[in-house]
Amino acid sequence: MGLLRLFLASLVLISHLGISVAGVNPGVSAVAIFYLLAGRVVSRLWREQPERGVISGGMWFYRDRLWRILPLYMFALIVAFIVWLLGASSPFLLREPEMTDWLANLLIVPLSYYMYSGQDAFTLLPPAWSLGVELQFYLLVPLLLSRPLWAVVFSALSFLTFSSAQLSWLDTDVFGYRLLAGIGFVFMLGVLLDRPSRLGRLWIYALWLVSALYVFWLLGWGTHVPYNLEVALGIALGVPILLVMERRGPSRSWRWLQRAAGELSYGVFLLHFPVIWALQLLGFSGPRTVLAVWLASAGLAWLGHRMVERPVWRLFRPRLPGHGAS
């Protein structure tokens, strides 16, 4: 699904240049679909892992995810650090960093709690807050995927939190999009997409129907607040897209393109903000720079994949049959 990943990363990129689609932020919907994809990927990894024990399997899973995420993240962090040293100006670079700021940028997870800590006043890779949410889900995966009851409880509590946010009992942006407490059920919906049991399919169709009807209601009569429509739209579109792509699969003639796109997607997602800042230093900004930002981000992503990710993976990353850039 490399082309889908690259397309979603590109939607995140254009949203950060202030481009919307009929008043809808496409990047938010893309992140929701990314969460579905993450659930599907880790479910497959957990099923195919060489270790069978919960603890040994969990350690294997954590190593695999860290080697997948950290090499390119550190590369992107260095690029962003250089652009910052050159004088980049941004609402995400407002204060002089302290030790806690550097630690938060290195550890990633604290970035997802910026609404409480004010960490967004110094974040070198602003989209990484969602990566922090993903990492928190990964920490829970061994427990959730080896204990079905815990998975059900987690999903139910998360959906209740999300629903409370839609009713404005909780902050809709924070608990309906930003925090794992409200968005965790989307990851678990992705897990169900990889586990085609009859009951699982029933829950998939039910949640899809609820999301689609919610989108229809918001478009016709509801109030659009950040980011209720975008998240629901991501679920409503993401579920059928993943189901169709799972059934059909890429043809052999498209596999090389899918792989190449997948190799660029993570880098485009991480690197577009440093590119935006670098272009601003040169006097270029706004939606008119979208092509330049995309090409430069893709170029840096290709460089990071070839010069950093591949060498690291060859040395350290556990391999599975069919285990690609995911």
Image (cartoon, grey):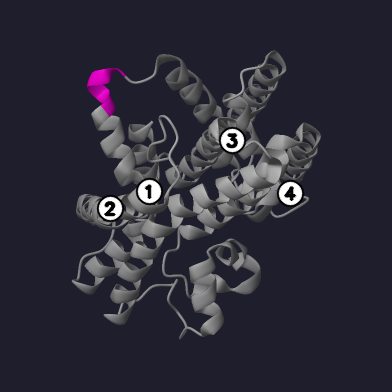
Q: Are marks 4 and 3 in contact (CB under 8 Å)?
A: no
Q: Are marks 4 and 1 in contact (CB under 8 Å)?
A: no
User: Horizontal and vertical percent for residue 279?
Assistant: 23, 66
Cα–Cα span, label 4 and label 1: 33 Å
Q: Residues within 10 Å of mark 2 (few under 14, many from 20)?
A: many
Q: Which mark is residue 168?
A: 4
Cα–Cα span, label 2 and label 4: 39 Å
| Residue at the image position 35 percent from the left and 34 percent from the top | 2
Q: Secondary structure at mark 2?
A: helix
Above or below residue 77? Residue 71 is above
From the image, tell me which residue sits under label 2.
301
Which tag, 4 or 3, sits closer to the chain's start? 3
Q: Quadrant of the C terminus?
A: top left
Q: Quadrant of the N terminus?
A: top left
| Residue at the image position 42 percent from the left and 48 percent from the top | 317
Q: Amino acid at mark 4?
A: Ser
From the image, tell me which residue sits under label 3.
46
Which tag, 4 or 1, sits closer to the chain's start? 4
Nearer mark to the viewer, of 2 and 4: 2
Q: Amino acid at mark 1?
A: Tyr
Q: Are marks 2 and 4 in contact (CB under 8 Å)?
A: no
Q: Would you say the magenta stretch is mainly helix, strand or loop?
A: helix
Q: Are marks 1 and 2 in contact (CB under 8 Å)?
A: yes
Q: Secondary structure at mark 1?
A: helix
Which tag, 1 or 2, sits closer to the chain's start? 1
Nearer mark to the viewer, of 4 and 1: 1
Cα–Cα span, label 4 and label 3: 36 Å
Above or below residue 285? Residue 233 is above
Q: Secondary structure at mark 4?
A: loop
Which tag, 1 or 3, sits closer to the chain's start? 3
Q: Amino acid at mark 3?
A: Trp
